[in-house]
Image (spheres, helix red, strand yellow):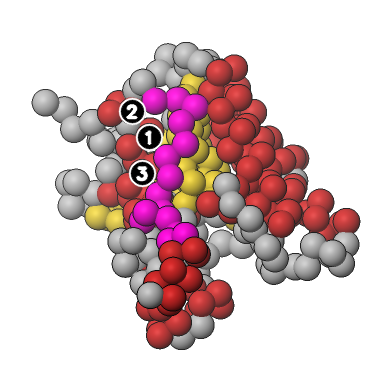
Amino acid sequence: MNNPLDFSGKVVLVTGGGKGVGKGISERYLEQGASVVICGRREPEELPAAKDQNGNINTATFFSCDVRDLEQVDTLTHSIIEQFGRLDVLVNNAGGAPHADAATVSPRFSESILRLNLIAPLNLCQKANAVMQKQAEGGNIINICSVSAKRPSPGTAAYGAAKAGLLNLSQSLAVEWAPKVRVNAVTAGLIRTEQSHLHYGDEEGISNVAKTIPLQRMANPSDIGDTCLYLASPLASYVTGADITVHGGGEKPSFLNAHEKNE
């Protein structure tokens, strides 16, 4: 039986794939033999690399691209086709937002957050779909969303709204672009990356946050990568328009804490 997770001969684009969650996703596809393209405004000091199933070191290819710039996205798409001849998987991972007070933040700031987390993925989806629809095997698009799309997101209100939009977009495109292209979303919870200390403090702070999660740990980038592997594989051939939540069981309802303190 052939390995359903073998991506040999497949071309995968991971936006923001040089660090954090994106790097974890890239490494998972590299392990399975895919030709992985990552993009960003700056090339990472070290490209994602992993040993594939044959024991060979498989390294990602970098293309410079600010995903908010449509002309650069056009150039990126053309460059991928010119070098690799196809595009099988798009993972819209690039995104994020700094903390900002919704009452005082500038409209320009809010527009930039929406552009990065919603408009840019939409533009990339369009470009990828145009390529995938012409391929005999079609293709897969995976949009990395966030639990901020489904719960209040104080301090990052525009980000939460953008991710909610991306979640709905994924469902709409799945209907429009079937059957050749499958479109799914991964709703990620708290993830431990090289920048976790900026959000959660030192190791003790990270440990305390992890204890609030039912599985008693934050996700690793590879956990998100595993989900992306599944969604782009034949194992998920009947899965489109889905939202797979990867959050370790979520957040314990706050009323339970209040109840426990009163016991």
Q: Are marks 2 and 1 in contact (CB under 8 Å)?
A: yes
Q: Is residue 218 visible to us here?
A: no
Residue denoted by label 1: 231
Give me the disc on residue 236. Answer: 2
Mark 3 crowd level (few <14, some 14–19, many ≥20, 10 Å Cα): some
Given the image, on which type of amino acid does mark 1 rest?
A: Leu
Residue 21 location (% of width, % of height): 46, 58
Q: Are marks 2 and 3 in contact (CB under 8 Å)?
A: no
Q: Is residue 42 visible to us here?
A: yes
Q: Residue at x 56, y 62 (%)?
A: 43
**Where 98 falls versus 68 (above or below)?**
below
Q: Which residues are magenta?
A: 239-253
Residue denoted by label 3: 227
SS for dot 1: helix
Q: Are marks 1 and 3 in contact (CB under 8 Å)?
A: yes
Pick the quarter of the image with the N terminus. top left
Q: Magenta stretch: residue 198 in it?
A: no
